[in-house]
Image (tube, grey):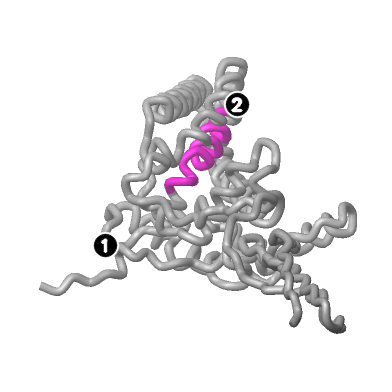
Amino acid sequence: MSILKQHRCPSRSLTHIPTSPRLHLVARLTCSATTTTTKPKSSQNQLVIEPRLETKPDSITPIIPSVGPPLSNDPSLQSTWSHRAWVASGCTTLFFSLAKTVTGAADTHMWFEPIVAGYVGYVLADLLSGVYHWGIDNYGDATTPIFGSQIEGFQGHHKWPWTITRRQFANNLHALARSITLTVLPIEILCNDPVIQGFVIVCAGCIMFSQQFHAWSHGTKSKLPPLVVALQDAGVLVSRSQHSAHHRPPYNSNYCIVSGVCNEFLDKNKVFEALEMIIFFKLGVRPRSWSEPGAEWIEEMDEAQSQVTVH
């Protein structure tokens, strides 16, 4: 006769570092010891490992919720009174600059020079919009000081470009209107030269409204005002067909968004590619355009417009 006595030790969990941030592999150890008075066996102490998969949040790696396009009633697309105040301030500043240009030209009987200066400002505004657009498309991220929110915004624009057409007017322009007010107002107060004022009014005005020109370039022709369509077709404003090339692989051309008049020269002569090489050899920083386009560059269709209602 044998006396069989069994001891069980408490279950113990071994948690391994998971390969996925959301999964833990937990192994339960069960220790059993069997004692007998007759004959000891080699399998007296057995270690039993029973693995089981347990899903629970990782306390180290946070779960980042998926981010989708803003809805049509999203507050981020709507204008606030602060936005409207800055746009009104910018427009007022431009109006007084235009008044000083006309008054100065009438007093000096000099009209040709301010007009030429205005055309130079128009071309320069297009060039500056391209340089700025190229910079925030290729360098920095959301944590970059000063420009971080704009970089993040332009990355989102590449993924959902149609959302800019739903952004309200003052919401779309207030940041540029604030910058124009703070930079042009001192020039307006200190300078009475109609040539300088002619340059400033056109250059600053085109920069301030460049985001609206950009929004129109994403609009549907049938929904745009006829005057806007005529200016786009004439090349005065950046056209829909020209800017659409910027939203196609390899996403490294047609950066200018005022008139697009500088795009052909910049792309044909590889100006931005040369700047990228200089920055890379001087600072060791690679632009995003050198890498294969990631998911943040791939455009997602507008589900609201893609749905067809059958009556």
Q: Is residue 304 left or right of residue 70?
A: left
Q: Nearer the viewer, residue 230 or 50?
A: 50
* Residue that badge 1 annotates: 222
Q: Is residue 58 above or below residue 46?
A: above
Q: Is residue 155 left or right of residue 94?
A: right
Q: Residue at x 64, y 46 (%)?
A: 142
Q: Residue furthest top?
A: 189
Q: Position of residue 268 (x, y in %)?
A: 67, 69
Disc on the earlier residue, 1 or 2: 2
Q: Residue furthest front?
A: 1
Label 2 is placed on what type of residue? Answer: Thr
- The numbered mark at residue 45 is none
Q: Secondary structure at mark 1?
A: helix
Q: Nearer the viewer, residue 163 or 114?
A: 163
* Residue that badge 2 annotates: 183
Label 1 is placed on what type of residue? Answer: Ser
Q: Position of residue 303 (x, y in %)?
A: 34, 65
Q: Residue at x 67, y 53 (%)?
A: 61
Q: Is residue 128 above or below residue 185?
A: below
Magenta residues span 197-212
Q: Is residue 182 above or below residue 57?
A: above
Magenta segment's dominant SS is helix
Q: Is residue 148 above or below residue 269?
A: above
